[in-house]
Amino acid sequence: MSSFGGPGGGQPAQKPIPPQRGSFPLDHDGECKDIMTKYLSCIRKVKGLNNDQCRGLAKDYLTCRMDKNLMAKDEFKNLGFVEPATSSASTTTTTGTTDNEVDKGLKGELRW
């Protein structure tokens, strides 16, 4: 007898993997919807590039979610936001580039 077409299809059950940051409640009441809408329209306007203005809106959206307990509070550096460098001193690396050049990356590039 063949198990083809039988219950489970003969494949072993796979254990689901939880998200890296855990689960968080959806914004059913729309508490942060206005900021989210502004962010999405900004992303459409810049055609998906990582624009400074859009990053500010993303930060505002995450702040709203944290304030309304829709996600765990965390530091923005852990969420991919880099604080602007306050010192103008830069050192040269072994590749001949300065630390400031390495930290800046390309315009529109996402930094992890």
Image (spheres, rainbow, N blue to C red):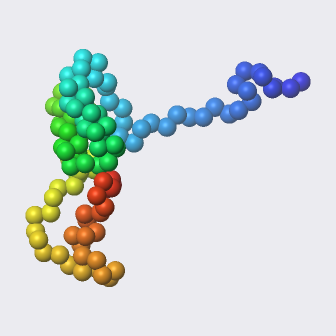
- 58 relative position to 5: left or right: left
Above or below: residue 79 compared with residue 31: below
Residue at position x 25%, y 38% from top? 42
Residue sitting at x 25%, y 70%: 101
Q: Residue furthest right?
A: 1
Image quarter of the C terminus: bottom left
Tell me the residue at 89%/24% (across/down). 1
Q: Give whichever of 57, 41 is nearer the camera.
A: 41
Locate residue 100, reporting x and y percent: 21, 70
Residue 90 in sight from this viewpoint:
yes
Place of residue 107 in the rendered image (x, y in percent of width and height, measured from the top left): 28, 58
Residue 27 image offset from top left, x and y in percent: 28, 23
Q: How many marks?
A: 0
> What residue sits 63% from the left and 31% below the top?
13
Q: Visible in this render: residue 72?
A: no
Q: Is residue 107 above or below residue 31?
A: below
Q: Quadrant of residue 64?
A: top left
Q: Left or right of 70: which side holds 19?
A: right
Taking depth in this image into account, of 42 and 98 the one nearest to the observer is 42
- The answer to which image quadrant residue 63 occupies is top left
Q: Residue furthest top?
A: 29
